Image (spheres, rainbow, N blue to C red):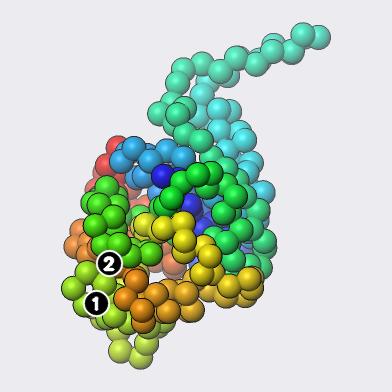
Amino acid sequence: MKVVILCGGKGTRLREETEYRPKPMVPIGDRPILWHIMKIYAAHGFKEFVLCLGYKGELIKEFFRNYLWNTCDVTLSLGRRADVRFHGHHDEEDWTITLADTGAESMTAWRIRSIDRHLGNDERFLLTYGDGVGDVPVPAVVAAHRASGNLCTLTAVHPPGRFGELSLRDATVAGFNEKPQAEGGYINGGFMVCERGLIAELPDDPGVMLEQGPLQRLAASDRLGVYRHHGFWQPMDTYQEFALLNRLWATGQAPWKIW
């Protein structure tokens, strides 16, 4: 299964950092949060990625294009027969990454619809957002999804405080409420598993959010499954959360570091 990561949003609530780069490129330590998310999946054996690019997507392309330059010692020969030699190895050598331009202004449903051709013959795919990390047991989410027969299974997490609430019923989502007045309980933490058939249900409209229409319809028809995660999960949506994640990383207390 390929891992589809939504990387196209503008991250307006983190304007201090995202004015100059897309939110997935905002760093935790010396690597962007996107790299941390990919490391989580790779630690579970999922190393084929499709990145849905949008706002300032060229910076994400540049990061991976220059990955060897950024992670290895380099010897240059500057003569007429120029040569470059990279020294050492890194743990990401078995990753494959598809960088897909899904539109600067597109919403999440359209971005997913746009990468259908990059999924090959896979019957299902993993899906998450490019701005949240956690110690989510991805294989357990996959197993729960396969056993459920649902079209999509999301990972429900306890919110830090200001997100839309999920109404849960056993192993399915009974209601999907985008930022209701009364908050609490569980929210959608990403780390989803989706059947390929989900894409056929996404509208041919770049202005539709996955969360505001398609997932609500799946919940209403009992086709949206849930995996309850009681461990660590944290988005990077504000400067305070950026500072928190960097503090945890700097002090060796990052629960999402499972590699």
* Along the viewing direction, whichever of 23 and 50 lies nearer the viewer: 50
Q: What residue is drawn where x is 27% and y is 47%?
A: 139
Q: Residues within 10 Å of mark 1 (few under 14, many from 20)?
A: some
Look at the numbered discs 2 and 1 and tell me whether their residues touch, using CB distance below 8 Å: yes
Q: Quadrant of the image for the N terminus?
A: top left
Q: What residue is drawn where x is 64% and y is 73%?
A: 205
Farthest bottom residue in view: 181
Q: What residue is drawn where x is 38% and y is 41%?
A: 46
Callout 2 amino acid: Val
Q: Secondary structure at mark 2?
A: strand
Which of the labelled discs sits on residue 22, or is there none? none
- Seen in the image, is 12 located left or right of residue 225? right
Farthest right residue in view: 80
Whole-percent x, y for residue 157 in the image: 27, 67
Q: Quadrant of the image for the C terminus?
A: top left
Whole-percent x, y for residue 199 in the image: 52, 62
Q: Which residue is mark 2?
A: 226
* Along the viewing direction, whichever of 97 and 15 lies nearer the viewer: 97
Whole-percent x, y for residue 107 in the image: 58, 69
Query: Within the image, what quadrant is residue 66 found in?
Result: top right
Q: Secondary structure at mark 1?
A: strand
Whole-percent x, y for residue 210 in the image: 49, 71
- Seen in the image, is 216 located left or right of residue 153? right
Q: What residue is drawn where x is 54% and y is 60%?
A: 112
* Along the viewing direction, whichever of 7 and 141 lies nearer the viewer: 141
Q: Which residue is mark 1?
A: 168
Question: Can the viewer see residue 161?
Answer: no
Q: Earlier in the sequence, mark 2 or mark 1?
A: 1
Residue 248 to residue 72: above or below: below
Question: Can the viewer see residue 227?
Answer: yes
Residue 103 to residue 176: above or below: above
